[in-house]
Amino acid sequence: MSQTIIPGKKLEQYKAFPYIAWVVFIGFTVFVYGITIELSRITSELNETTLSLEARIQNNSLSIEELTEKNKLSDE
């Protein structure tokens, strides 16, 4: 299947081109804005999850230290 180039107007010469270009530009801008907002939300959720996990790890490490101290005392 061969493609032939049809001589004619350039894309910029059509009357509807500026309107279509602006619609595409604004649509792309809204798309990027939406992605940015979603990324910001996900980053906040990950930060909260990280803080929660760090707190749980800290609590667990304290529990492990208490258990090892109790174990040492009971061995004596």
Image (cartoon, rainbow, N blue to C red):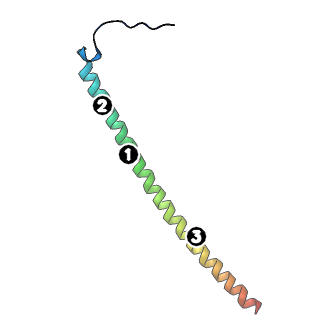
Helix, strand or loop status at disc 3: helix
- Which numbered disc, 2 or 1, marks the residue that appears first in the sequence? 2
Q: Is residue 16 above or below residue 2?
A: below
Which residue does the numbered mark 1 point to in the structure image?
A: 36
Residue type highlighted by circle 3: Ile
Q: Position of residue 41 (x, y in %)?
A: 42, 51
| Circle 1 Cα neighbour tier, 10 Å, few/some/many (<14 / 14–19 / ≥20) | few
- Which residue lies at the image location 48% right of the left edge and 56% below the top edge? 46
Q: Is residue 15 left or right of residue 36?
A: left
The foreground one among 25 and 12 is 12
Q: Where is residue 38 in the image (x, y as percent from the top left)?
A: 41, 46
- How many angstroms separate mark 2 from mark 3 (CA)? 47 Å
Q: Position of residue 22 (x, y in %)?
A: 26, 27
Q: Position of residue 29 (x, y in %)?
A: 32, 36
Quadrant in the picture for the C terminus: bottom right
- How many angstroms separate mark 2 from mark 1 (CA)? 16 Å
Q: In this view, does 13 lie above or below 45?
A: above
The quarter of the picture where residue 67 lies is: bottom right
Helix, strand or loop status at disc 2: helix
Front disc: 2 or 3: 2
Q: In this view, does 13 lie to the left or right of 67?
A: left
Which residue does the numbered mark 2 point to in the structure image?
A: 25
Which residue does the numbered mark 3 point to in the structure image?
A: 57
Q: In this view, does 58 lie to the left or right of 11?
A: right
The quarter of the picture where residue 68 lies is: bottom right
Helix, strand or loop status at disc 1: helix
Count of numbered circles on the image: 3
Residue type highlighted by circle 1: Thr
Q: In this view, does 38 lie to the left or right of 23?
A: right
